[in-house]
Image: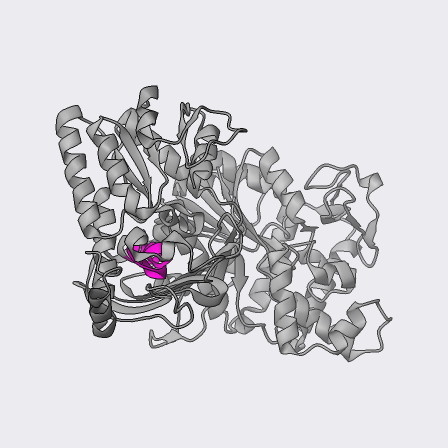
Amino acid sequence: MQTPVFLDHLPDIDAVAGQKPAQYRLERNKALLELMLDQSTVWHDRNACPACDQDTTQNPFFSQTMMEFRRCMNCNSIYAARVPGQTTIDRLRLDHIQARAADAGGDREFEFTSLLNWISLTEARLERKLDRVLDIRFATQAPAWPDATERLSHNRSWDFLELTPESDDFSALEAAVAKAAPKAILMPAELDRVADPAALLSALKAAATPGTVIFVASSCADGLEYEILGADSPSFVPLDRLTVFSVKGFETLSTKLGLQVLEISTPGRLDAVILDRYFKSAENTAIPFWSSFFREADKNRLRDLQILLQRSLKSGVLRFVLET
Amino acid sequence: MGRIRHDAMDRHGDFEVVVACDTEIDPKATVPMVTDPMAVYEYNPDVIVCSVPNMMIPDVVCTALERGKHVFSEKPPGRNSKDVRRMIAAEEAARAAHGGLVLKFGFNHRVHDAIEEAKKLTDAGTMGDLYFMRGVYGKAGGPNYSQNWRNDPELSGGGILIDQGIHMLDLFQMFAGRFTDVQSFVQRKFWTDVPVEDNAFALMKNADGIVASVHSSATQWQHTFRLELYMRNGFLSVDGILSASGSYGTEVLTVALNRLDATGSPIPNPEQQELRFTEDRSWDKEIAEFHAAVVKGTPLVCGTSQQALDVMELVEAIYAADPEWSTARQSTPQMAME
């Protein structure tokens, strides 16, 4: 198993703390509130950590604002204590994407290139052609993505599985994956948003032929932003973070489902700039070491910290390469 | 080196070391020991592992082959290309006489994890055509530098280039094939009490137009290994090389594919992937390849006698390409080996 570190420029803090991201968070929180106020919503209690099965009663609260979230004492994953059905989640998400369609542009070219290069370099290291890739729902989330694959991804054909309201067992998705028969699956924005990540992964495993390589990305509970800011982190949007896996948690789940873990990384680039803004922008409570660390930090120090976090698998995004 | 090889064979499990030869008998040795190299044949080994100074390598290798033994030999393969040709002739004669004999040289850098990963990336075609390579391999002399046999040209054939830089040259040829057009500067700056170079700089080109530059140094006070490959679609580098001393650091493979702007031109400073390797498995891989060649007849990929000849000819070409050094080398009996 390999643990690559992804080195790049530090992003602009406005990527998460600007007006547009703030608006996005408000809209998603509004949707969650409406969902909670809707008496007809059916909720499923999670009696155990969705990553490692640790009994929920043993896991302390991570947040009780709006929804109850727990942090697993065993694997460090963060998860909502109850979740709506998958169909409901998908409908809400689709409504939101469609409502923001006019505003969905934005320059995500570097993000797209990073995903494509990730696949290309992994393919080379595995010494195996991954020339037929199935994208799971990212094309719906990021409408410019299919065009990017056409321009930038040569010698590879792409299928795009659009976001549609799914059943709790992802049976339609499973059938679509089986029909596409991909050599690789890319799923960069689903794990933290679905009601039952294990059911999603199980559907993929059941549908894909043995040897299919799955590229997964998600938010990561081991990230320093979550460790210090907790639920105050601007990355923590409850409806989009129903499960925030830790590295240990996701590795445990993958192994339990019979998936082989080929590669683990935490390529998040935002921890340092988020914390830098937090400590410099307000009269925050003094946190030993970190308060002075960030108040005195320049860009070089922030970049060094972000690289250290990645090398330590402690940044706020995780990527796994799995094999069925 | 003999102990390192012995340990690797023990880890492999399918070797039985029947005798060891050294200048002195080690009272703590766990296998029979002799001091006369010819005495090892009384134990009727199948394989000879040759970990001796450069000037002894041809005799030991040729004798072993003549006696029908498989041979694993350290690098450099003797002191010059003449030595290698002699061993190749012995190898061919031994194969004709005994059939299926294996001669492998220990160019272990080829099988370091970071280098193997780099080779996978270039072989896959993802990175595109190779344009140029840069290599720096250097150390801070070493203890008893002037007394060390490695710096006596009669015994070693040269200085830092043939001792350490040869690994970098071997890697260049692994990635790009043979280099024929060579320019160089070969110097002796700090260690002036020995007649071998302490720095060699070379710029070379192969038939495909791929350019490579190497700097092999005994005055690189900070131990350094760095290999860079630049290709059409990006670049990769290997920083550090795992060694017994650990003084060259862990191996870090960095690779990047270019990001393109709207016109298709590369945008500077692309995202890089960094992979760290912390376990030196090269010794075990070499022994495993040698074992497979001996037992199963699997063709050698690394450390063939042809690769040994190619790299030794490149070493000689670098020495010869600096007119000042070449003239001095020819006029000094100790240095005029070939």
Specify whether residue B31 is in view.
yes
Q: Is residue A324 above or below residue A115?
A: above
What secondary structure is the stretch in magenta mostly built from?
Answer: helix
Q: Which residues are magenta?
A: B157-172
**Residue at figure coordinates x 42%, y 48% from the top left:** B112
Asked if residue A11 lies left or right of residue B333, the reply is right
Q: Nearer the viewer, residue A38 or A7?
A: A7
Q: Position of residue B205 (x, y in %)?
A: 22, 66
Q: Nearer the viewer, residue A163 or B109?
A: B109
Q: Position of residue A68 (x, y in %)?
A: 81, 51
Quadrant containing the C terminus of chain B in the rendered view: bottom left
Q: Position of residue A264 (x, y in %)?
A: 56, 49
Q: Position of residue B279 (x, y in %)?
A: 52, 45
Q: Is residue A176 above or below residue A310?
A: above
Q: Nearer the viewer, residue B34 or A236?
A: B34
**Residue at figure coordinates x 17%, y 45% from the top left:** B85
Asked if residue B136 lies left or right of residue A24, the reply is left
Quadrant containing the N terminus of chain B in the rendered view: top left
User: Does residue B311 show up magenta in the picture?
Assistant: no
> Residue B336 falls in which quadrant of the image?
bottom left
